[in-house]
Amino acid sequence: MSRRTSPFSRRTDWPRQTNRITRVHEELKEQNIQIVDLTVSNPTHCGLAAPPEFLDALRDPAGLEYAADAHGLLSAREAVAGLFARRGLTVDPRDLFLTASTSEAYGFVFRLLADPGDTILFPTPSYPLFHFLGEINDVELGFYPLTYRDGWHIDMAGLVEALHPRVKALVTVNPNNPTGSYLSEEERRHLNKIAAERDMALISDEVFYEFPLGDAPGASLAGNAPALTFTLGGLSKFLGLPQMKLAWILLSGPDHLAAEARQRLEIIADTYLSVNTPVQCALPAWLRQADTVQAPILRRVRENWEYLNREAAGLRGTQVLRAEGGWYAVLKVAPVRSEEEWVLKLLSKYHVFVHPGFFYDFEDGPCLVVSLLVPPDDFREGIGRVLSRVEQQGGA
């Protein structure tokens, strides 16, 4: 009998070495050097926390009772359905499943759709968390490219090239993080056609959907009928409440596929029953007050976005890439040094922290990524340092 070399799974054997950027950042903090952090994206750390009276809803006595429901409490699901009704979409609460986080929602859907070794396609550039979510769920990660042409678009030829028989689903982030690009109607039609022809599912992460930088958001896959579709959302972004741990899956698609998916998801969700009752009881009251939280967040990201574009206009060496929604902005800077060198220079010499594009798998760089949630005074100070240094050193 051969001996096992480790009690741990190969799927969790991730590299854990601290990267150079993180090490320098930690060293500066240990020296009590004040850093202007342009990466902070936790609304509770940006002066955008929900008002204290939000806690009153947690005092509902119904939170002391427990009634297991694989979908989540009906009252909570009806409240979520009401969100879609405001968009003009009728949602049956039976098509909603509540989870403890959007990450858990991904896990449920991956387990529903993919056997070990099957592939899920993800956009690139996009959020690095996808690598971990795929590996934890024994899913092979495939990627389809987004390209920049006066805005970000799905490279349909690149998407078709990424398809193969073991691709079970395609993820779209709408708007994408951090590129801020919504799906267009044309892209939605193409995705539906591909999914229907290949018996694939669509997974649409719409956690940032309610935060357009312009007048209106783009196309949504919520309630999408032509293909089996799972639309994800949650309180972390929708209400700036990452600490309250509630998200949702909206199921839609052809009737026979949706019915089968519903029954299978019920078993998966019933196995975990992970959403706590007090938060579910509080959800209707919170969603009725959504504007009190969403409006300040939307105002913050729009004001910072507009400031960034005004300040960068006409500067040498810097291009603010067009975005349509979400909480992030991407700056393309002069290729006089690598992304890591740009970030380290800004951090160690000018004490401003930004993320490099390679954190998000940008290929056409160098790019720097900043959060639009940063408090305005800090944002203006930090962006001022970034733009002045880039123009001085990269605009030749």
Image (spheres, helix red, strand yellow):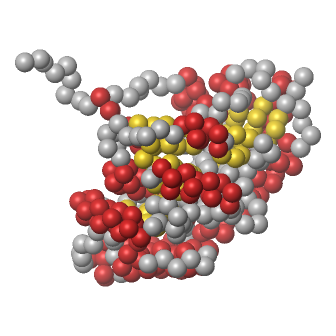
> Residue sitting at 41 percent across and 70 percent down?
255
Residue toward you, 352 or 75: 75
Residue toward you, 30 or 311: 311
Task: Please say if 359 is above or below 254.
Answer: above
> Residue sitting at 32 percent across and 32 percent down?
11
Quadrant of the rendered image containing residue 157: top right
> Residue furthest toward the front?
197
Q: Position of residue 154 (x, y in %)?
A: 66, 46
Q: Which quadrant holds the C terminus?
A: top right
> Residue furthest toward the left?
1
The answer to whether residue 336 is left or right of residue 315 is: left
Task: Please say if 113 is above or below 247.
Answer: above
> Residue furthest toward the top?
2
Residue 38 in view: no
Quadrant of the rendered image containing residue 161: top right
Q: Position of residue 284 (x, y in %)?
A: 46, 79
Q: Which quadrant holds the N terminus?
A: top left
> Residue sitting at 26 percent across and 31 percent down?
9
Q: Position of residue 217 (x, y in %)?
A: 69, 64
Residue toward you, 179 or 278: 179
